[in-house]
Amino acid sequence: MTAHQAPRPKTDLPREFAFIRRHFSALAGPAALNLRDDAAVFAPPPGHEMVMAVDAMVENVHFLPTDPPDTIGRKLLRCNLSDLAAMGSMPEGWLLAFARPPHITEDWVAQFCAGLAQDQAQFGLSLMGGDTTATSGPLVLSLTIVGSVRPGQAIRRCGAGVGDGLWVSGTIGDGALGLRALQGTDPLPDPTGYLAQRYRLPQPRVGLPLHGLASAAMDVSDGLVQDAGHLARENGLHVRIQADRVPLSAAARALGGAWLETCLTGGDDYEILFAVPPECEQHLLLHPSLPTPHGDVPVTRIGQFEAGPASVSVMDGAGRPLHFRVSGWSHL
């Protein structure tokens, strides 16, 4: 893990490296080489391929300045773990780029790292290395996740066929609703704090057994409708979603139908959206949950893949099309 700052007197140079040792050395695993070298050295488990992904989070874009520091660290790690889960990969380690503005204090960083340590223990991985630097702008965090999977068993976005069912894990909409509740710009009650917690701490479906079941998959981060559109395009098929079948939490249902568009397009779900061929669906329909190392995860059939233009249609319970202002979140 290296450090970069504006030029300073030579007597000040060790401060950056002291910062790294003080906050990040306890997170480092064997691949990190005590965070004293320019790169990590890692070998995947025998008979496995490496799977890698990277996600960035920017203050006031992906998290609120008032969010607790420990939840920001955990959300950063969990968003990346969700990418691994969508491919049927298990986590091995991670690298961090940390661009620190002046308002981020030592105590803030300590809480941030405490949250990461908690989730490292829960999900079984460790820090491999990274980079720290100063910035005059907002806090910017970038995490690269490293996982492994047996050769040929990674689940990709392509592979779905006509007639495959469209399934999703968990519940949809809680994260987007939680953000609205925290922002306070809409009359959105969250008396128990459940929705806010779902926004701050997504539940990555690590270990979801997709190999041999799913023909295609991805995680839902930018909105259910938009991410279903990605699957539609990658497979050259039309995706039809039945809105009344989309699983909502009790907290989301209590808000009523006025919030349906937010639930289906708001994003921050970090659930797994996957295609299941007809010959594999019967067992799931009878037993709609899948085991993971962190407990059983409910799954729901919400639509299907059809021949037709590579696009998405959303239907209500009476078969009428629903139209939304946007389909999901745009990063640019």
Image: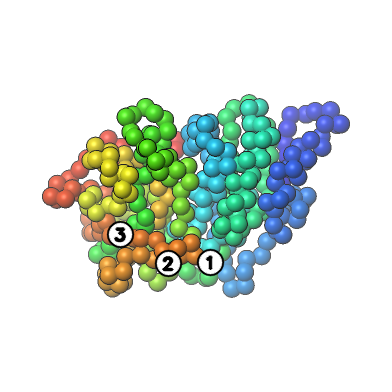
Where's residue 244, x and y in %? 22, 51
Comes first in the chain, label 2 or label 1:
1
Which amino acid is tagged 2? Pro
Mark 2 and mark 1 in contact? Answer it, CB < 8 Å: no
Mark 2 and mark 3 in contact? Answer it, CB < 8 Å: no
Q: Is residue 76 left or right of residue 245?
A: right
Which amino acid is tagged 3? Thr
Instruction: Classify 102 as above or below 302.
Output: above
Between 197 and 239, the one lying in front of the other is 197
Instruction: Classify 306 as above or below 252.
Output: below
Q: Is residue 181 left or right of residue 103?
A: left
Q: Secondary structure at mark 2?
A: loop
Can you tell which quarter of the image residue 42 is in? bottom right
Q: Secondary structure at mark 3?
A: strand
Question: Residue at point 37% right, 57% down?
Answer: 169
Q: Secondary structure at mark 1?
A: strand
Comes first in the chain, label 3 or label 1:
1
Where's residue 305, x and y in %? 26, 59
Comes first in the chain, label 2 or label 3:
2
Question: Residue at point 59% right, 51% down?
Answer: 118
The residue indicated by pointer 1 is 149
Q: Residues within 10 Å of mark 2 (few under 14, many from 20)?
A: few
Viewer-side label of 2, 1: 2
Give the distance between the C-alpha atoms of the residues marked 2 and 1, in whole angstroms. 18 Å
Between 201 and 49, the one lying in front of the other is 201
Question: Residue at point 27% right, 42% down?
Answer: 254
Give the distance between the C-alpha atoms of the residues marked 3 and 1, in whole angstroms. 25 Å
Identify the mark at residue 300; answer none if there is no mark. 3
Where's residue 272, x and y in %? 40, 56
Give the distance between the C-alpha atoms of the residues marked 2 and 3, in whole angstroms. 14 Å
Question: Residue at point 32% right, 65% down?
Answer: 288
